[in-house]
Image (cartoon, helix red, strand yellow):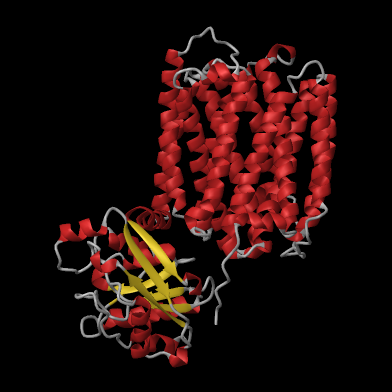
Amino acid sequence: MSQSPPSQPNQFSLLKQRRFAPFFWTQFLGAFNDNLFKTALVVVITFDALSWTTLAPSLVTNLIPGLFILPYVLFSATAGQLADKFDKAGMTRCVKWLEVAIMSVAGIGWITHHLWLLVAAVVGMGIHSTLFGPVKYAYLPQHLGKEELIGGNGVTEMGTFVGILAGEILGALLVVMQPHGLYFEAGATILVALIGLLASYRIPASPAPMPTLKVSWNFVGESLRNLRYSSKNRVVFQSMLGNSWFWFYGAVLLAQLPVFAKDYLHGGHGAFVLLLTVFSLGVGSGSLLCERLSGAKVEIGLVPFGSIGLTVFGADLYFASDAFVGGAGAAQAAAGIMTVLAQPGIWRILFDFLMIGMFGGFFIVPLFALIQLRADPAHLSRTIAGMNILNALFMVAASGMAIVLLGQGLTIPQLFLVTALLNAVVAVYIFSLVPEFLMRFLAWLLIHTVHRVHTVDADRIPREGAAVLVCNHVSYVDAIVIGAVAPRPIRFVMDHRIFKTPLLGWIFRTARAIPIAPAKEDPWLMEKAYVDIAQALHEGDLVCIFPEGQLTRDGEINAFKGGVAKIVERSPVPVIPMALRGLWTHLLSRNRENIFGRAFHAGLRSKLALAVGKPVAPQDVTPEGLRQDVAALRGDWK
């Protein structure tokens, strides 16, 4: 019998455990060093361009991210194979040694004032990040339980963006410190690389899933094979595309910040650091909030929620920027942070950056967790590598689009608006291909806005393995409420007439519900339903049925039909009784009381509850016994 895990501690408790903490600090220091180096280079190009190059600053600031991600295109397929073939702890240590060597080369570039040596180091750090990417995201599901993935990914993404933020701030500050700023920058990057190397030696052994894998060095052929393999799993592949789109959006936004801070906010490098700080805090807080908003499960309903925010606040950033530029004096060149903060309209711009970051966290963290959970474990590193290839292509496209559109005369705020509108188009496309995202969003929205759902012993719903859930049937939204609080997808068995209900029927079809009809009405459909149920249980799914066979007409629990016994006779799995409380007053129940009176009585957020009982062994299942269990769980609250 599948057992539910005990309640999980706070996600930050992982930072005290060796299975997570050394890995966390290693990846944190890697992100920190990447941005300590890249930001310093962007700052000197933007604010001290003439002493380094004759190229236009906007061209170079869009070129540097493109060069950084070029290795993702060339080497991601090889990196994924290496991560599946070798121990991930050992791979991490090799990568950190490479980082020390690259930062030593960059140090020479800083000291000798040699721009193209620094550009070569940018490519080198791209190679470093390419090799580490598949290791990073394949490590987590190897050491964390399924119930810890959202929290672990949230903390990891928070750490990544805090590392990015801290690196960007320190990089922007060190490089302008006269007269020794370049020496400070060179020394700091080498020191951080060494500390990261030491942290990597504390990462526990992470055995390779495929140690006998033969590595193909044909990166073009292997890249295509990776993408073809990943595309066979529709949800995983669309999640990969969604992930890559986020990096497209972020690449467009972040690449413009130095010039935006200088030319539109009329600030110095401090204004640039301010924008980075606000954006990174948004991503970090959004990543951490994911666990709370999702109830510690992989809640892909947050992805459409995040996408909506990216469009709304990205579009508002255009209008806020336009208003700010119109009211600011052009003479305020290189103003300090306090001067910038005193300008009318700046707080709206900062709020937009904060919200874009936060909703970006809502968007990206569930996608990472979903890929880790549903991808083939033996192929996970190569799946991540395939995603990195897509990320790289999307980010190169982002740099190309920005260069072309800015070259055609678009302003940076107009570029922000174009990207926000493109985000809406891409979101509609992805969610139309995989309606599960939108369906989960509607379910998540239902229980976080219209209803307040309290759960009792919900950890009794198994997180893995087959089981049959039985519940009283009160309203047309019963399945949505149950599905929204369950730790994983459920195959619902429901009356074929409810299955055909407009709008709700689309949601149920998307959730792969199984329609059923009485034998006297449609014997073929009834038999097909039992076959589909047996197949679902054979595949390890959860199946939920409403044994009353119809919605209650008086709020009481009707007699249970014998379908449950027939199901477990074919598929001997545990049966878990559940009871919904509080839905009898719902507007979509068959309650004949005054609709307006019920709506007023329930208030803006009606209170509901789902109580879960102890599993019943298949040999002990009887319709009468299950009805008594459900009635006891429901109590007097209809």
Please give the name of the residue rendered at 26% of the width and 83% of the height, measured from the top-left corner: 523
The answer to whether residue 135 is seen in the rendering is yes
Give whichever of 459, 384 is nearer the camera.
459
Relative horizontal placement of residue 560, taking residue 378 as reference (left or right): left
Which part of the image, by quadrant, shows the C terminus? bottom left
The mark total stands at 0
- Residue 551: give x, y in percent of width and height: 24, 74
**Coordinates of residue 125 in the picture (x, y in percent):** 74, 37
Is the residue 252 above or below the residue 368 in the image?
Answer: above
Q: Quadrant of residue 450?
A: bottom left
Give the vertical position of 120 relative to 229 (above or below). Answer: above
Write the residue at 23% across / 67% down: 589
Across and down, in percent, residue 41 comes to 71, 25
Q: Is residue 375 visible?
A: no
- Residue at the extreme top: 331
Q: Is 513 displayed left or right of 407 in the figure?
A: left
Kindly identify the residue that appears in the image at 33 percent across and 70 percent down: 581
| 476 is higher (above) or lower (below) than 425 | below
Residue 634 drawn at (x, y percent): 34, 76
Q: Is residue 25 above or below residue 576?
A: above
- Residue at image position (53%, 55%) is 291
Query: Which image quarter is the N terminus in?
Result: bottom right
